[in-house]
Image (spheres, rainbow, N blue to C red):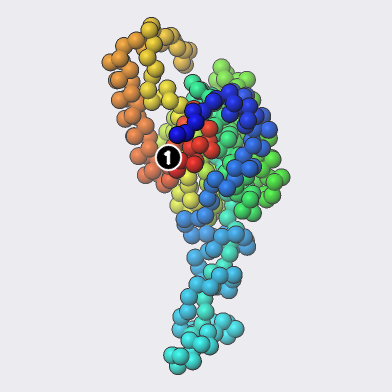
Amino acid sequence: MQTPLDPQAWLAQSHSHGVNLALKELMYYKAKAQLLELAPKVKIKNTLTGQYLAPHKGRGMEFAEVRHYQQGDDIRSIDWRVTARTGETHTKLFQEEKERPVFIFTDFSNSMLFGSQLLLKSVQAAHISALVAWSACQRGDRIGGIVFNQHSHLELKPSAREKAVLKLCHNLCDSHQQALNAIDEQATNNFSDNLKRLNHLAKPGSLVYLISDFNALDDASFKQLEILSRHCELIGCHISDPFEHQLPAFKQAVTVSANGQDFALPLMDSSFRARFAKNAEQAFSTRFNRLTKSGLNLISFNAATPLELQLVRK
């Protein structure tokens, strides 16, 4: 029988606050890097030598197959055993190891600064970003990315080793703190503009993790995703909070503020909660379908459960 989660004990163990973000809690995921598998599912187009096997045929580290000798083939690759057995000259083909940059696109927009249990969605996004970065570092990949909030963005050009991870983690902490400090200010930095920046930054063959609740996508955003998916492998990490799916029962109405307006939520009304849940399910389904059509492989995460427990279950 699984032991129930003690939120306070886990927060202490992972050095997490739940709302504020600190470097120490992102360092926690260095020891969890093996939870992610970053093996490529698409052709790799980068010309740098690295950890992955490219599907084109050439001289390299891994044997691929044998075929008839063609003019121009390297005679050092002739397979003399097959040649002797068949009476026709055959040559060995190899797959070359290629390096693939990993890009991490982290959204700290205002809709991400919400959490009803354990963590803000934005804090969970930072944890996922750190885990991806440490996993990529462990494999020897170069790491790049964009971290943004509603007021600014920080870019990290692809670089290798722990130095790159630490740079990303510092960017995450700085951008998150700015987002919290300026939560009531007018937004000046939108999702689609940051996707456009990512399109310029990510080279063909890159693996791109997009970490967001994807609440702020417009037609321009989906267009940028479609362009990006033509030459990169996209993994969308969709983060939500339990309250976005199902409102809790409560003995009286609760007033909430959003976009400068106050709304009364009759949480004591079971039919209201049921309608909310149905509408939320439809909205999530519509969003997922459009993201998938735009080229994303989607993984769902929630902000109310430690990241390592969600990955263990997958």
Q: Which sits in the foreground, 261 or 94?
A: 94
Task: Please identify the residue farthest to the right as the structure is shown.
Answer: 163
Q: List x then y, in percent, for residue 154.
A: 63, 36
Decide which of 188, 314 is in the foreground and name it. 314
Kindly identify the amino acid type of the residue bearing the numbered disc 1: Phe
The answer to whether residue 155 of the structure is visible from this angle is no
Question: Where does label 1 land, which residue?
Answer: 222
Element class at badge 1: helix
Query: Which residue is rendered at x = 37% and y = 14% of the image?
Result: 249
Label 1: how many Cα within 10 Å (few below 14, some 14–19, many 20+): some
Pick the quarter of the image with the N terminus.
top left
Question: Which residue occupies the foreground of this view, 152 or 32?
Answer: 32
Answer with the quarter of the image where residue 188 lies: top right
Q: Position of residue 64 (x, y in %)?
A: 50, 72
Rendered view: 252 above or below 107: above
Which residue shows up at 60% across the image and 59% down it? 51
Count of numbered circles in the view: 1
**Residue sticking out furthest to the front:** 1
| Residue drawn at (43%, 25%) of the image | 242
Q: In the shown orientation, is residue 26 left or right of residue 118?
A: right
Image coordinates of residue 153 in percent, x first then y, are 61, 34
Image x and y of residue 268, in percent: 34, 10
**Image position of 115 (left or right of 48):** left
Q: Is residue 283 above or below residue 102?
A: above
Q: Where does the C terminus fall, quadrant-wise?
A: top left
Q: Is residue 116 above or below residue 231?
A: above
Q: Nearer the viewer, residue 270 or 10?
A: 10
Direction left: furthest residue:
271
Q: Residue at x 70, y 46 (%)?
A: 162
Q: Is residue 269 visible?
A: yes
302 in relation to 276, above or below? below
